[in-house]
């Protein structure tokens, strides 16, 4: 007899401190080698740093707005047409937007070396909250590339 997965069994539980599903998803993406407690500690220490630096906002609000500011609206996908490959701009669905935003924030954080991870993560969150930083630059580059290739939009599947 096979076990069937229900929708409730596969859904992500909110994190313990902020009761946020987005924070839980971020911690899971931050996690390396199955060390969730280490990932949670890094995330919560980054949130504590944000609370100290940005006193007029809640840390969860800064984090949520930072992820929102990094989410791309459109991206380019390669499409092969008659031997030529075109970069076709396509809209991004909401789940992929969130995944890309988290991925870009983590990539920007991991690229900067020489400081503890929680400080780098807090810096990137604050920069993204203010619509600057490496992750926002990545988003702008993707949008710029989509805008440059909008002549090929008719190839969209």
Image: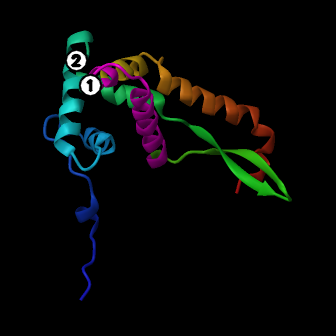
Q: Which-is-in-front pick, marks 2 and 1?
A: 1
Q: Whole-percent x and y of residue 100? A: 47, 41
Tell me which colouring the rendered structure shows.
Answer: rainbow
Q: Compare residues 115 and 22 and report the one nearer the observer.
A: 115
Q: Which residue is mark 2?
A: 49
Q: Note whether 4 is above or below 102 in the view shown.
A: below
Total of numbered circles in the picture?
Answer: 2
Q: Within 10 angstroms of label 1, few (less than 14), some, or many (20 or more) residues?
A: many
**Residue pictured at 16% horizontal, 41% vertical:** 37
- Looking at the rendered image, the quarter that the C terminus falls into is bottom right
Q: Earlier in the sequence, mark 2 or mark 1?
A: 2
Q: Whole-percent x and y of residue 58? A: 23, 20
Tell me the tag on residue 118. Answer: 1
**Residue pictured at 48% horizontal, 27% vertical:** 135
The outermost residue toward the front is 114
Residue 78 appears in view: yes
Mark 2, secondary structure of its residue: helix
Q: Within 10 angstroms of label 2, few (less than 14), some, or many (20 or more) residues?
A: some
Q: Quadrant of residue 54?
A: top left
Q: Quadrant of residue 18?
A: top left
Q: Whole-percent x and y of residue 61? A: 29, 25
Q: Label 2, label 1: how many angstroms apart (C-alpha)?
A: 8 Å
Q: Which residues are magenta?
A: 95-121
Q: Are marks 2 and 1 in contact (CB under 8 Å)?
A: yes
């Amino acid at each position: 007899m096979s076990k069937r997965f229900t929708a409730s069994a596969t859904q992500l539980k909110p994190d313990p401190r902020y009761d946020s599903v987005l924070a839980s998803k971020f911690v899971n993406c931050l996690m390396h080698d199955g060390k969730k407690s280490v990932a949670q500690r890094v995330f919560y220490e980054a949130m504590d740093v944000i609370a100290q630096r940005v006193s007029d906002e809640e840390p969860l609000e800064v984090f949520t707005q930072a992820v929102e500011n990094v989410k791309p609206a459109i991206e380019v996908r390669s499409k092969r047409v008659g031997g030529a490959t075109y970069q076709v701009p396509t809209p991004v669905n909401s789940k992929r937007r969130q995944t890309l935003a988290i991925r870009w924030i983590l990539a920007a954080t991991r690229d900067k070396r020489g400081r503890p991870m929680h400080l780098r993560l807090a810096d990137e969150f604050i920069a993204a909250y203010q619509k600057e930083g490496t992750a926002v630059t990545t988003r702008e580059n993707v949008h710029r590339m989509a805008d440059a290739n909008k002549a090929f939009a008719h190839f969209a599947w």
